[in-house]
């Protein structure tokens, strides 16, 4: 039955997250924006205790809304939270039971640890099938030897340098095989030959580190390959390894949408509160010609927000029901990316000098929000996926 | 617990409506738009499906099904996917029946509801919109004045569907600063059905200007009696209905243009394989789904008897824009062919443009 009511448990979780965002996160939000490579140690310790080890996969509706509240506090600081992260998601979708036990155990014990995923390369962003990093099996030692350069690894520094975490590295075992040759490998912190080379300076989400990694004859045990090492060409588009990578996106994209919506609502709430202080409340039921331009703007932002929220909830709900959701996940991600960009920019515009000033957080949210239209598949890539799905086209038929 | 899955019963209803629409509505909708007439047998067949009687309690001879705005949105979308004119015609009696079910006095229910449960399509309608650019449902120019056990109605209405044949008109009027509903029976003196309107779209639906000149009705015909009606809720139910209908019209246009784009070749390949077209279609699909879910949420809230003014208004605002954008883009995808009446997209474009205007002309 169609239902929009949260369970009491979910509501309590969301309320807790909101309270923490308001009381703990917001007060330190600006500091970590202006001190880009500093780590919020206390917060991390706290986050580790609260949710250490929880992965991003299999998150339900309540958890997606909790993440929304976290990002209402600060999207960068939310991304800093320790845990298995995207690396864990890849291990869960592609790893055997043994591998899951072996690699994920660390995320529920000891000091805070991070998991990350390394896909993008200087020459391959959205075109993930074009990655150049190689994995060659050394049959004598039964080790994989990885070589290549990875960039834009969210949390890479914390995973490899600041903790005993891990990065799931996508590499090709057969360059001639295209997507079929692409496989995920677990590279643990401290592995010789894996070096964090650079931590990027960014437009926004500055609390979160975005790292580059060099793999120089990096040797890892044979068992660190996730899934089968076989290069099986099912057909030119669907292969076991790559398909799994894409399955991870089905789980992560709605969550990115939730993150986007958190930032969007932060801006929206700021605007509405500022207007309320001046005695301006939004009169929802009125016909358009009776509304002020400001009211129309706010209502349009709210309608956009609601549209993206509904698409996000549907995609997450499908995931929780184990229903296929590639189309809906991409719809949600594409829409939320556009919406957060629009809302945060509009909020800066509407608030005039308050919007542009670093005294308030609006300008920060405009910078933070934009990442959601870029990572885990740009808005354009997600539109492409939606288009292929609704047209029933392959990647050859719609490029 | 959040869920996006319609109940089994709702799924059965949707299947039934889809079948009816495909077998009947979709066969004739273009001719109906050209001729301005809907074959009576289609309306009779739809009546047999019992959309209205199913929401009326058994004690008033209805089927005693659940009164659900959410189920109503599912039905409205499918009917409007078939054709907006016919959807509005078929659901027109709800404009009186549902407010009476929700807010009528016991007397009013006893008096009016059984007539909606007979074998024949009961022609009943509502008159809300007034012919002014600054029309505001909360500040109507049409007035109702209490006068010795009666009400006297004065004012001009437009976009009143099926008015010429209606046995009952629920006229909304300004009653001491508040909008209230007044049930006017056919033939009441002072009630004049002026002429059938000529509109850009929904051409198969007959709509009329209606004039009320010292139209005197019994005091008992004030919807909800002395307590009156919750007009805000009625308006929200209407916004939800029209949002769902917008989804139906837009979905029809989207599906047609999507299929066309896959068939139509240019530069040696289907135009759908070009991102300029494919992205337009993707955006249409996203906005259609978003509108549907927003309408569901507003309807769900109304079913819980909560105030859904914000949800319904935002859904409708989004739906207004979506309906225009999607149907306009559907015409665009077909290019020159979209402008020709051999293809239906121009019809959906004209109908889609009306959604923003039709507040109060449909209800769930």
Image: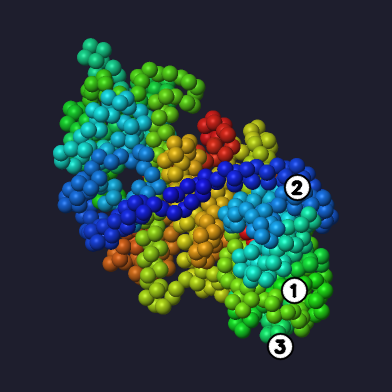
- The colour scheme of the drawn protein is rainbow
The residue labelled by disc 1 is: B184
Task: Give the class, few, some or many, for how many residues have Cα within 10 Å of label 2's Cα (few <14, many ≥20).
Answer: many
- What residue is at 75 percent from the left and 62 percent from the top? B115
- In front: label 1 or label 3: 3
Q: Earlier in the sequence, mark 3 or mark 2?
A: 2
CB atoms at circles 3 and 2 under 8 Å apart? no
Pick out the residue farthest to the bottom.
Answer: B148
Q: Disc 1 versus disc 3: distance between alpha carbons? A: 17 Å
> Which disc number belongs to residue B25?
2
- What residue is at 23 percent from the left and 23 percent from the top? A220
Rendered location of residue B23, percent (x, y):
75, 42
* Left or right side of B292 for B119: right
Pick out the residue farthest to the front.
Answer: B59
Rendered location of residue B127, percent (x, y):
71, 70
Task: Give the class, few, some or many, for how many residues have Cα within 10 Å of label 3's Cα (few <14, many ≥20).
Answer: few
Instruction: Please give the chain letter of the residue carrying mark 2.
Output: B
Instruction: Please give the chain letter of the residue carrying mark 1.
Output: B
Q: Earlier in the sequence, mark 2 or mark 1?
A: 2
> Which disc number belongs to residue B148?
3
Instruction: Please give the chain letter of the residue carrying mark 3.
Output: B
* Left or right side of B349 for B39: right
Q: Disc 2 versus disc 1: distance between alpha carbons? A: 31 Å
- What residue is at 50 percent from the left and 64 percent from the top? B306
Residue B361 at least partly seen: no
Quadrant of the rendered image containing residue A363? bottom left
Q: Disc 3 versus disc 2: distance between alpha carbons? A: 48 Å
């Amino acid at each position: 039955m169609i239902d929009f009511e949260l369970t009491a448990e979910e509501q309590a979780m969301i309320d807790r997250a909101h309270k923490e965002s308001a009381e703990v996160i917001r007060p330190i939000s600006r500091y970590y924006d202006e001190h880009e490579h500093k780590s919020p140690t206390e917060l991390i310790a706290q986050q580790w205790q609260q949710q250490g080890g929880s992965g991003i996969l299999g998150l339900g509706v309540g958890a997606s809304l909790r993440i929304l509240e976290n990002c209402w506090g600060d999207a960068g600081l939310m991304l800093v939270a320790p845990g298995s992260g995207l690396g864990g998601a890849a291990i869960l979708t592609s790893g055997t039971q043994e591998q899951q036990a072996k690699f994920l155990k660390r995320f529920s014990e000891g000091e805070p640890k991070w998991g990350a995923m390394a896909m993008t390369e200087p020459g391959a962003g959205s075109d993930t099938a074009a990655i150049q990093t190689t994995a060659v099996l050394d049959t004598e030692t039964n080790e994989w030897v990885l070589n290549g350069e990875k960039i834009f690894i969210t949390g890479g520094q914390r995973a490899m340098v600041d903790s005993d975490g891990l990065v799931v590295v996508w590499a090709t075992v057969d360059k001639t095989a295209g997507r079929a040759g692409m496989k995920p490998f677990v590279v643990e912190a401290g592995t010789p030959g894996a070096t964090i080379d650079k931590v990027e300076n960014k437009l926004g989400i500055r609390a979160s580190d975005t790292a580059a990694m060099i793999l120089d004859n990096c040797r890892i045990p044979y068992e660190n390959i996730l899934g089968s090492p076989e290069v099986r060409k099912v057909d030119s588009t669907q292969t076991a390894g790559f398909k799994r990578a894409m399955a991870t996106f089905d789980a992560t994209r709605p969550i990115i949408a939730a993150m986007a919506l958190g930032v969007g609502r932060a801006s929206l709430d700021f605007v509405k509160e500022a207007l309320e202080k001046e005695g301006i409340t939004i009169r929802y039921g009125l016909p358009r010609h009776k509304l002020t331009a400001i009211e129309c703007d706010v209502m349009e932002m709210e309608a956009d927000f609601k549209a993206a929220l509904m698409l996000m909830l549907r995609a997450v709900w499908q995931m929780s029901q184990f229903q296929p959701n590639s189309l809906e996940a991409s719809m949600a991600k594409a829409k939320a990316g556009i919406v957060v960009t629009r809302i945060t920019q509009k909020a800066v515009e509407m608030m005039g000098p308050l919007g542009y000033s670093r005294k308030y957080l609006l300008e920060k949210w405009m910078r933070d929000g934009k990442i959601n239209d870029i990572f885990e598949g740009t808005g354009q890539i997600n539109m492409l996926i939606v288009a292929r799905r609704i047209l029933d086209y392959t990647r050859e038929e719609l490029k | 617990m959040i869920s996006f899955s319609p109940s089994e019963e709702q799924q059965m209803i949707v299947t039934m409506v889809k079948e009816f629409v495909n077998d009947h509505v979709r066969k004739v909708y273009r001719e109906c738009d050209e001729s301005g007439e809907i074959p009576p047998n289609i309306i009779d067949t739809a009546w047999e499906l019992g959309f209205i009687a199913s929401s009326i309690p058994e004690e008033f001879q209805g089927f005693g099904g659940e009164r659900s705005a959410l189920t109503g949105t599912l039905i409205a979308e499918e009917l409007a996917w078939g054709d907006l004119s016919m959807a509005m015609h078929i659901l027109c009696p709800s404009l009186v029946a549902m407010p009476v079910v929700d807010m009528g006095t016991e007397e009013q229910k006893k008096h009016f509801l059984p007539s909606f449960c007979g074998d024949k399509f009961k022609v009943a309608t509502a008159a809300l919109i007034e012919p002014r650019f600054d029309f505001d449902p909360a500040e109507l120019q049409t007035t109702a004045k209490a006068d010795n056990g009666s009400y006297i109605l004065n004012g001009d209405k437009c976009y009143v569907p099926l008015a010429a044949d209606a046995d009952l008109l629920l006229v909304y009027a300004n009653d001491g600063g508040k909008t209230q509903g007044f049930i006017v029976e056919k033939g009441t003196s002072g009630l004049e059905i002026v002429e059938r309107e000529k509109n850009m779209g929904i051409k198969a639906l007959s709509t009329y200007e209606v004039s009320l000149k010292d139209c005197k009705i019994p005091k008992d015909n004030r919807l909800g009696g002395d307590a009156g009606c919750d007009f805000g809720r009625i308006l929200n139910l209407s916004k939800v209905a029209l949002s769902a209908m917008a989804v139906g019209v837009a979905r029809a246009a989207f599906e047609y243009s999507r299929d066309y784009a896959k068939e139509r070749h240019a530069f040696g390949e289907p135009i759908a394989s070009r991102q300029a077209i494919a992205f337009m279609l993707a955006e249409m699909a996203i906005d259609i789904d978003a509108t549907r879910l927003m309408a569901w949420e507003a309807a769900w809230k109304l079913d819980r008897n909560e105030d859904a003014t914000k949800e319904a208004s935002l859904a409708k605002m989004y739906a207004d824009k979506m309906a225009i954008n999607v149907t306009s883009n559907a015409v665009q995808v077909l290019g020159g062919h979209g402008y020709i009446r051999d293809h239906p997209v121009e019809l959906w474009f004209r109908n889609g443009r009306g959604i923003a205007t039709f507040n109060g002309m449909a209800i769930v």
